Amino acid sequence: MTDRIYYTEPSCRSFEATVIRIGERDGRSIVVLDRTAFYPTSGGQPFDTGQLGSVAVVDTIDEGDEVIHVLSGPMTAGASVHGEIEWTRRFDHMQQHTGQHVLSAAFDRLFENRTTSFHMGTEVSTIDLAREAAASDIDRAVEEANRVVWEDREVSVRFVSADEAARLPLRKEPVREGTLRLVEIKDFDLSACGGTHVQRTGAIGMIAVTSAERFRGGSRLTFVCGGRALRAFRDYRDAVSGAVRVMSVLPHELPSAIERAQLESKELRKTVTRLQGMLAGHEAARILAETPVSERGVIVAALDGWDAAGIKAIASALTTQSGVGATLISTGNPKAVVVARSQDVAIDANKTLRTLLERFGGRGGGRPDLAQGAGLNGKIDDILAAARAVLIRGG
């Protein structure tokens, strides 16, 4: 059995221990210690990393009564070792986990909206609420949570029996039986939890909800605390500053400016499509005029300044003439391709396209008389040469 130091001393950064068992898992050395401050993945909180002597701890796993330490190198059974927790990672996890308790308690106390699950990622964390939360409710809960953070309330840990726990105002029913570890945020929250937490709420720094979405009849909130909140602010600051500079507007004018730009872009795309449709017939006529009648069964061309819809329109215009088999490619990135044939030509346009996609990548499909794709990678001349060879073979 491993004595778990983190249960009673979550701020412990270093410790002494003895290796009581060694082994191997998935090609890596593992050890079990008589005592450890390394937290294993559990309850939504990721594992700790750090050092055991000169050997790195790359993973920590909870296996019943034992904590498994996955190492970068071997160790000797019975050896005495000095453990060092990678503190930046641990403290970040402590900020997020304690922040989650405060945020979940705020929703519970203000709106009786329970947290059904919690996940801590490497950049952000999430909680799932039982009911959908309105934007105004989220703002109120975040304000309440940060009030508790800034009041720097005590965070304490104690152990109780199941009978004792049954008489206490726990925020949610515990899922474990037997002796329970309770984490209490003074006069605000009391929850059964095995995770690591800061000793006072002030160490959380700040709690910020960055997004919310509907999820399984409730709401999923993405949030950040402490150092993550600072990094998130910097990211948003840089994004807003860049957008303000590009759009030449004030920050509060960004939403309407972006909406105007989207509408203008949509109208421009419509105009381009309309003009390309008008020009497609002229471009097809030019290509036919430059191609001897005897060679119209193998028309291969790269067209500059045309998008996928444009080259499809040209291909369709070409194949209104008899005896035409054509492969047209746009020169922009990603490269688009259209293969088309007249009704009296025997090539299979879809088969021809698949041959090109197999060689140059991309995706697409179609019918024997018309097929189109996009995302081809390669030099234009190589794609054109391959298309010509396939058309000559008859698709």
Image (cartoon, rainbow, N blue to C red):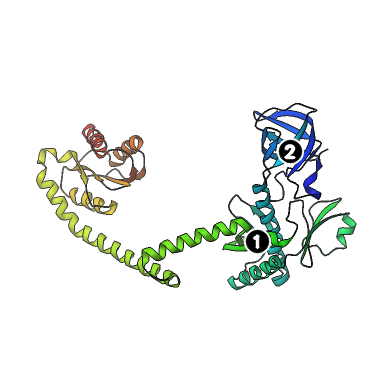
**SS of the residue at dot 2?**
strand
Compared to 350, does 120 lie above or below? below
Give the residue pinned by disc 1.
205
Q: Which quarter of the rendered picture does the C terminus lie within?
A: top left
Compared to 217, does 377 lie above or below? above
**SS of the residue at dot 1?**
loop
Q: Which quarter of the rendered picture does the N terminus lie within?
A: top right
Give the residue pinned by disc 2.
83
**Residue 347 shows which numbered tag?**
none
Pointer 1 local density, CA inside 10 Å: few below 14, some 14–19, many at least 20: some
Compared to 248, does 382 lie above or below? above
- Please give the name of the residue rendered at 15% of the width and 45% of the height, measured from the top-left corner: 322
Q: Quadrant of residue 135?
A: bottom right
- Left or right relative to 118: residue 185: right
Pointer 2 local density, CA inside 10 Å: few below 14, some 14–19, many at least 20: many
Please state the horizontal and vertical placement of residue 258, each as a whole percent of the image: 39, 67
- Please give the name of the residue rendered at 89% of the width and 58% of the height, measured from the top-left corner: 164
Compared to 260, does 161 lie above or below? above
**Front position in the image: 334 or 27:** 27
Give me the C-alpha separation between circle 2 and circle 1: 28 Å
**Front position in the image: 110 or 56:** 56
Amino acid at dot 1: Gly
Please state the horizontal and vertical placement of residue 39, each as a whole percent of the image: 73, 45
**Front position in the image: 334 or 319:** 334
- Left or right relative to 351: residue 167: right
- Please give the name of the residue rendered at 36% of the width and 39% of the height, measured from the top-left corner: 361
